[in-house]
Image (cartoon, rainbow, N blue to C red):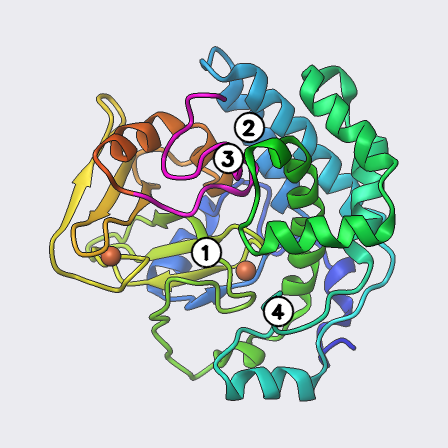
Amino acid sequence: MVPPGSREALSKPPRTPSTGFGESTLGEVAQGDPVRLPDLATVFSKRAERLQALAEGHELEGFLRMIAALVAAQDAALRDLPPGSLPGAAEIAKGKLVGRAPLDPSAWRRDGSWRAALAHILAGIDRGKLPEAAETARAALERTGEADLEVLADRFLEGNVSPQEAAVAVFVAAALQVAWTRMAALLDLADLGVGPGKEVEADTGICPACGSPPVAGMIAPGGTKFGHRHLHCSLCATSWRYVRVRCVHCGSTDKISFRNLAGTSFLRAECCEACLGYSKVFYLESAKALEPLADDLGSLGLDLLVGEEGFARVPNPFVLGVMTTGEAESL
Ligand code: FE
Ligand code: FE
């Protein structure tokens, strides 16, 4: 079931020119865009490109190159994904009644698209970029049956990944991202309560499309005004506007303070004394090639710093099970 008017989304040319993360549309972003659905033509390819650039000389070079290979495999899997289904209008309406995002994984039973994506990723990824533990996990997943894969997906979506499952969870996360990103791209903004003429200020720290937490926030240059912050979904790559200097976890605007690493003016951690949560904020004015998920992984050092001070966040999906409360030592 695909909402009217969105069937052609998969075959549309890129909505933005190939300039990466939004430089060409900053004026537009600064003015508004309460919600931006993912652009399937570029979302994974630009992310892979950014990961490769970040990997060069990075202390986590091997890890970043592995994730770059994984994201490149996601891009290929997306292009070969068989037709899937979306929640129907009735299911979306029902979800709205209880305040759920239309693609909330806990509100609606997913179809097998993600498993098709997983099979494609496992077969297609550049195995030369995988360390031994990742290759062992890849091979094990290829032998795993449908029912067990569904259990793994449920556990990942519930954020319930043990350190022993971390290597497997990376592949499961990647496949679920492919399926959810496609679904999000096929939504109509009207399903999210936004559209032409409606000025909705998103006031939630979770994704309006799928209910997942963000990986990071991006602040666009605002010209003479303050730029808006957009949070970026960890699962479906939708982004939505969120007030600046406000805790993403509890909504508090009180007792917010910032931390940054020496020499990184384009990135700060917004820390909340009220709930001890934090989130990363990237400033596009200072560094234009940023990509939220890639740059989150490229700046795990900041997570260590604020983790040591006792602040916590929902980890990036690719370090779930490794980093639980800001601990990334074992990467
Ligand atoms: Fe989402
Ligand atoms: Fe808070």
The residue carrying mark 1 is: 213
Q: Which residues are magenta?
A: 312-331
User: Residue 246 or 239: which is nearer the viewer?
Assistant: 246
Is 100 drawn above or below residue 133 in the view shown?
below
Which residue is rendered at x = 62% and y = 75% of the image? 188
Task: Give the residue number, with chain letter if any, for mark 2.
Answer: 51
Q: CA distance from mark 4 to mark 2?
A: 27 Å
Are dots 2 and 3 in contact, CB under 8 Å?
yes
Q: Nearer the viewer, mark 3 or mark 4?
A: 4
Name the residue tied to disc 3: 294
Q: Residue at x 26, y 34 (%)?
A: 306
Q: Earlier in the sequence, mark 3 or mark 4?
A: 4
| Residue located 58% across and 37% down the image | 47
Question: Label 1 is placed on what type of residue?
Answer: Pro
Residue at 45 percent across and 13 percent down: it is 59
In the structure shown, which secondary structural element does the residue marked by tag 1 occupy? loop
Residue type marked 3: Ala
The part of the image, by quadrant, that contains residue 109 is bottom right
Cβ of mark 4 under 8 A from ligand 1: yes
Q: Is residue 327 magenta?
A: yes
Q: What residue is disc 4 on?
A: 103
